[in-house]
Amino acid sequence: MRSRRRVAIGAGGAVVLLAALDAYVVTTILVPVVKDLGIAVNRLERVTPVLSGFLLGYVAAMPLLGQLSDRFGRRPLLQACLVFFAVGSVVTAVAGDVPLLTTGRVVQGVAGGALLPVTMALAGDLWDERQRPVVLGAVGAAQELGSVLGPLYGAGIAAVMEWRAIFWINLPLVLLAMVAVQYAVPGGRGEGPRPGVDVVGGLLLALGLGLLVAGVYNPEPQESALPPWGVPVLVAGAVVLAVFVVWEVKARTRLLDLSGVRRGPLLATLGVSLLSGAALMVTLVDVVLVAQTVLDKDTTEGALLLTRFLVALPVAAVAGGVVARRFGERWPMAAGMAVAAAGYLLIAAWPADLASASYGPLPRMDVDLVVTGLGLGLVIAPVSSAVLRFVPAARHGVASAAVVVARMMGMLLGISVLSAWGFYRFHRLTADLQPPLPFLMSEDEFARRMEVYNAALDDALRTEYQEIFWITAGMCVLGALLALAAGGSGRGGDRTGPADDGEIRPSSGHTGRDPGKDSATRHVPTKGLGNILGKEG
């Protein structure tokens, strides 16, 4: 039994890693994709839905599909999502235009969005409460590993094959994952009544996020940062999300149950996760674009430049866990976001002759990217630890999922909003530039003017990236302030959640008492997304 459950969680971790790889793989192959689809490099805004589509599907589907796994079982949901992930991969691989490519990525995202919470739920099914946090940490590590390996994975395959091969390779990987899931993952739904599914809440969340993303997508940013439909669609998205919040307060079955939890510190910590996710996605996309559009590096060279940041990220994540254990979560969270803000300010100040810039013997690009990666990495473990501290042990799975959802929402909204602003600024900065016409001048004069024109384009690109990194630094400063507001050091008796004496107790139904008063001696039944750790009593 023990070996089989390890195989089960290993299979779950593998599919989580597969989805995470595909979430980040596009960042390093964006320029080859754009060229293959016949889009000019100075019209990158037209391919923004390819980035945001996957993230939108991933975030919007995660809570609802996690609940469906409670009702219908882990294995059927995992198998269904793997099938749809394969379908989305095929659509992406054969796509010849942006709408079809975006469709494939959305399908991949929806399917991938279920894999993390369902695997977390599997950990809750197979391990007791004392061992469960370690297993959940391993699953979370698979998710984080995708952010490190995804860009390198994409660049490595694109260096030897066409970018479409990345998505064809998913098919045998999915088949292997399905065999492992079928063998190792239990097929039943467990005992007890079937938990409820908050379909209305899930649809409201998906609709609200979709409207926000659509509101900031501007295929023609020459005149304004927002499209003509931007303001009304953004207002509609905000209204839908407000309705979602009201629904979650009043509904009996909820996506996220916060009863008996101090909401202020919890939401502040989730805000740190959201802002760090936005900063992470900006780095993954814009550092590679800087390399390919300003430094004239190819896909592989752009990915190798990004490795400075990616290697520092997990190293600092381990260090952040050690520091949080000794000093509590607040200070490493705040320090990490502050260091990241300093890193983005350094990146924003990159000079025109970046290739030769250095700090003594150390290349400036390397140092600045390592500093930024260390800052964001320092935040990862304290955020997860703090959220787990704020909630009862019976909701650790939903708490872990909430951290990931917040980070992915930050990535989704961050890249959508900052891309809209960046593309608008680029077109404004280049509005008066006119390329020289070769038939009106001599060959030498045309070459001279073309050099001047290309230099002006590079200046506009540098200004656009500079402003984006300034904004990102501001988000990190806000994240540091939220970290300070989260309260509590997290050491010893400073725990804000219920006491946990290590004793394993069965989940009980609601007795009509205030769950906040007796949660130290019994487990409060979880509802909605909270059910991903087990069955509702």
Image (cartoon, rainbow, N blue to C red):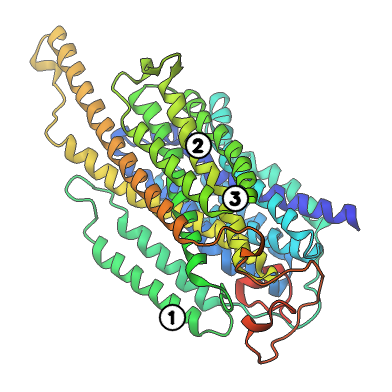
* Residue 522 appears in the figure: yes
Disc on the earlier residue, 1 or 2: 1
Between tags 1 and 2, which lies in front? Answer: 2
Asked if residue 533 lies left or right of residue 247, the reply is right
> 465 above or below 260?
above
In the picture of the structure, the residue carrying the numbered disc 3 is 327
Between tags 3 and 1, which lies in front? Answer: 3
Residue 341, label in figure? none
Confirm or deny contact between disc 3 and disc 1 (CB under 8 A).
Answer: no
Regarding mark 1 in the picture, which secondary structure is present there?
Answer: helix
Regarding mark 2 in the picture, which secondary structure is present there?
Answer: helix
In the picture of the structure, the residue carrying the numbered disc 2 is 373
Q: Name the residue rendered at 61%, 77% in the picture.
A: 197
Q: What residue type is labelled 3?
A: Phe
Disc on the earlier residue, 2 or 3: 3
Regarding mark 3 in the picture, which secondary structure is present there?
Answer: helix
Q: Name the residue rendered at 56%, 75% in the picture.
A: 258
Residue density around tag 1, few if under 14, some if 14–19, many if 20 or more, within 10 Å: few
C-alpha gap between disc 3 and disc 1: 37 Å
Give residue 356's quadrant in the image: top left
Q: Which amino acid does label 2 sit on?
A: Gly
Image location (x, y in percent) of residue 253 = 59, 81
Q: Name the residue rendered at 40%, 71% in the picture.
A: 241
C-alpha gap between disc 2 and disc 3: 21 Å
C-alpha gap between disc 1 and disc 2: 38 Å
Residue 246, label in figure? 1
Between tags 2 and 3, which lies in front? Answer: 3
Asked if residue 93 lies left or right of residue 40, the reply is right
> 211 above or below 55?
below
Quadrant containing the N terminus is bottom right
Q: Which amino acid does label 1 sit on?
A: Val
Which of 424/383 is in front?
383
